[in-house]
């Protein structure tokens, strides 16, 4: 089953709770929360305090995408703030295996993400420790960018490796996902679709979520 995770980066952040309620009503399985530190990526967004406040207003599954350096210093605090799933970047972590285990020990699901320049094979050894792998389909940092079709091969390679291991792995794609690129990503083996602008720029969010599915 394909799961839809709208990214609130493209939403009206001054009305975050009602924006999230709306995508829940539209049938999205989870909400994607992009955390940017201005160091790992050349942009800033929001951090734990916003997620903690939102947690009080929403029972949705919180899919937290950390685009930060030193994720080991903050993962636990994002879980305390309400993250159900913590995704951190392979490129930013000193000991990804250890961090995946720490996230699980703190009671959340754990995922690793790779930037466009990172090869799929580099994270094969981590797959057994992951609930999900996020293959970035744009350079992380900004919403509204163009989908990179070259990333599809990495999705296929990771799906093949998970199948070889007999693991029911979630594979997420993030960046430039719209109904056309969603089709390509799912055909390559992805089953969790992040979409910012294609959902939040639509006046009818239910129609936008349905179109992706
Ligand atoms: C980009 C973020 C994405 C972003 C996606 O660094 O990780 O989650 O919000 O936005 P769209 O769907 O507009 O490409
Ligand atoms: Zn993201």
Image (cartoon, rainbow, N blue to C red):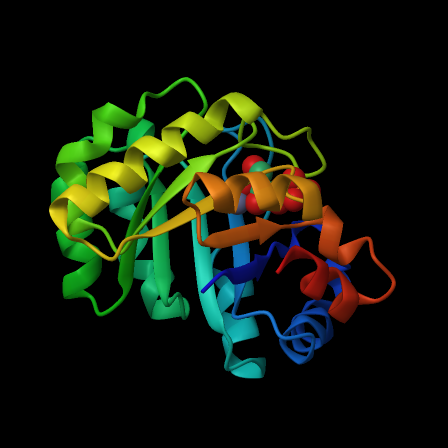
Quadrant in which the C terminus is drawn: bottom right
Task: Tell me where residue 196 appears, x and y as whole percent.
Answer: 67, 50
Task: Tell me where residue 74 appears, x and y as whole percent.
Answer: 32, 50
Quadrant in which the N terminus is drawn: bottom left
User: Which residue lies at the image location 69% right of the left edge and 48% below the top edge?
Assistant: 179
Q: Observer-nearest residue: 91 or 49?
A: 91
User: Which residue lies at the image location 52% right of the left edge and 70% below the top edge?
Assistant: 29
Q: Quadrant of residue 158?
A: top left
Is 129 left, or right, of 74 in this rendering? Answer: left
- In the rendered view, tell whether residue 87 sits above or below residue 176: below
Residue 46 visible here:
no
- In the rendered view, tell whether residue 187 sits above or below residue 121: below
Task: Tell me where residue 156 appears, x and y as whole percent.
Answer: 37, 34
User: Which residue lies at the image location 22% right of the left edge and 70% below the top edge?
Assistant: 107
Task: Tell me where residue 90 appears, x and y as whole percent.
Answer: 29, 32
Residue 194 visible here:
yes
User: Which residue lies at the image location 67% right of the left edge and 71% below the top edge?
Assistant: 23
Q: Observer-nearest residue: 81 or 155?
A: 155
């Amino acid at each position: 089953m394909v799961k839809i995770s709208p990214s609130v980066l493209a939403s009206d952040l001054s009305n975050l709770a009602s924006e999230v309620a709306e995508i829940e009503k539209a049938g999205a399985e989870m909400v994607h929360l992009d955390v940017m530190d201005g160091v790992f990526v050349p942009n800033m967004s929001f951090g734990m305090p916003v997620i903690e406040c939102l947690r009080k207003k929403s029972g949705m599954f919180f899919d937290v995408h950390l685009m930060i350096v030193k994720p080991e210093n903050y993962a636990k605090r994002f879980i305390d703030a309400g993250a159900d799933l913590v995704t951190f970047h392979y490129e930013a972590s000193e000991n990804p295996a250890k961090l995946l285990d720490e996230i699980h020990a703190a009671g959340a699901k754990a995922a690793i993400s790779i930037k466009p320049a990172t090869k799929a094979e580099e994270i094969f050894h981590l797959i057994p420790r992951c609930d999900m792998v996020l293959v970035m389909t744009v350079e992380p940092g900004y919403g509204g960018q163009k989908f990179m079709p070259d990333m599809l091969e990495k999705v296929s390679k990771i799906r093949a490796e998970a199948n070889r291991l007999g693991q029911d792995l979630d594979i997420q794609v993030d960046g430039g996902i719209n109904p056309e690129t969603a089709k390509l990503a799912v055909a390559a083996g992805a089953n969790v679709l992040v979409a910012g602008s294609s959902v939040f720029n639509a006046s009818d969010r239910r129609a936008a979520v349905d179109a992706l599915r």
